[in-house]
Image: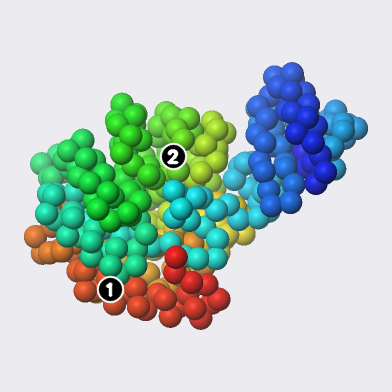
């Protein structure tokens, strides 16, 4: 259920509704909008009587939310969510670009990549300090040392840091260093971690699981919002199909479908989506044309020597050319690159 407050509703009116919801043993979620505040209700097993709230001061209307994902639904918040990451916006008319190496390998490698993507126009630096790998014998990341290098790169470039958390025990450490905490595809339905991410004061980049439906993905995001963190962006990174010519199948259908279903920002990852360096720019362009609010691209100074995902990482020169191309695509659809 969603309680929509009038534009002239006072803070006291809103608080009275919130307290009544709590008194019913349910969870209220006050969601400020561009023109009014709405209060979402979660925790009820069945329908609620709208009459409990319709007569209260400041209440405009009571709406029943039809989607199983309540707080991420456009029924609850019709306008787009824009996440302000220390002045770098994720969502809205300007398209954000996140770029950097798959893994933080060394100080030299990371700083070279950071300065290169900054010069080309990126606002966010991606880089993995903890790396989930299929084989236990492959490079697993530098851990906290990698996080410290990401913080140094941020200090030098001003880029906002996006990095993945894999284990709930590592979450406090990641929150200390990161500006955006990424939950990788393999952890999309790690419900303990999703709940913990709902308690942090940092934005979350939630990647789609390789076999997840859109509904399952949105329900995973609902876990984070239901536990109090409304700063969530969804990242389409390709799903597993029967196709073997590419690493994954980048589901660009998901972008407009998500934009219709949810107010959360939508990010496209063309690097993991296709897994072939030569074709990453084409899929990045396509993602923007489809309506994505951001792209996240792997860039490595020397991809042939990368310890992970070198085959899908662009060189700095290739990334600079991609940035030129995506500015053209963004302009053609009435948007810009942040």
Which residue: 55% across, 57% down? 258
The vertical placement of 221 against 102, above or below, is above
- Location of mark 1 (residue): 320
Distance from label 2 to label 1 (Cα)?
29 Å
Q: Residues within 10 Å of mark 2 (few under 14, many from 20)?
A: some
Which image quadrant is residue 41 in? top right
- Location of mark 2 (residue): 202
Query: Residue 187: x, y in percent?
Result: 36, 40
Is residue 182 left or right of 127 when viewed as pictured? right
Query: Residue 96: x, y in percent?
Result: 43, 62
**Element marked by disc 2:** loop
**Element marked by disc 1:** helix
Q: Residues within 10 Å of mark 1 (few under 14, many from 20)?
A: some
Label 2 vs 1, first from the N-terminus: 2
- Please name whichever residue, 57 or 63, is drawn nearer the observer in this view of the structure: 57
Query: Residue 293: x, y in percent?
Result: 49, 62
Image quadrant where one finds the C terminus: bottom left
Query: Residue 182: x, y in percent?
Result: 37, 45
């Amino acid at each position: 259920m969603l309680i929509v407050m009038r534009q002239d509703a006072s803070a006291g009116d809103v608080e009275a509704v919130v307290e009544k919801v709590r008194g019913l043993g349910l969870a209220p979620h006050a969601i400020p909008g561009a023109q009014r505040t709405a209060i979402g209700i979660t925790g009820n097993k069945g329908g609620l009587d709208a009459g409990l709230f319709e007569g209260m001061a400041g209440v405009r209307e009571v709406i029943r939310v039809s989607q199983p994902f309540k707080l991420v639904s456009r029924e609850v918040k019709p306008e787009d969510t824009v996440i302000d990451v220390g002045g770098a916006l994720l969502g809205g008319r300007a398209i954000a670009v996140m770029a950097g190496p798959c893994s933080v390998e060394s100080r030299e490698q990371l700083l070279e990549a950071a300065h290169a993507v900054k010069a080309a126009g990126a606002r966010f630096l991606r880089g993995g300090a903890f790396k989930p790998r299929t084989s236990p014998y492959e490079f697993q990341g530098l851990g906290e040392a990698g996080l410290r290098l990401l913080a140094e790169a941020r200090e030098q470039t001003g880029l906002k840091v996006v990095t993945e958390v894999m284990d709930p025990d590592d979450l406090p450490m990641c929150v200390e260093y990161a500006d955006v905490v990424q939950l990788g595809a393999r952890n999309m339905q790690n419900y303990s971690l999703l709940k913990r991410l709902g308690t942090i004061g940092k934005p979350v980049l939630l990647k789609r699981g390789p076999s997840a439906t859109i509904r399952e993905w949105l329900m995973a995001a609902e876990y984070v919002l239901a536990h109090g963190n409304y700063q969530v962006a969804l990242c389409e990174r390709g799903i597993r199909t029967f196709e073997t010519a590419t690493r994954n199948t980048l589901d660009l259908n998901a972008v407009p479908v998500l934009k219709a279903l949810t107010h959360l920002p939508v990010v496209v990852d063309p690097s993991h989506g296709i897994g072939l360096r030569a074709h990453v720019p084409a899929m990045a362009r396509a993602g923007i044309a489809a309506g994505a609010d951001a792209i996240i691209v792997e860039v490595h100074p020397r991809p042939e020597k990368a310890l992970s995902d070198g085959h899908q990482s662009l060189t700095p020169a290739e990334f600079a050319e991609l940035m030129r191309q995506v500015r053209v695509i963004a302009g053609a659809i009435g948007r810009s690159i942040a």
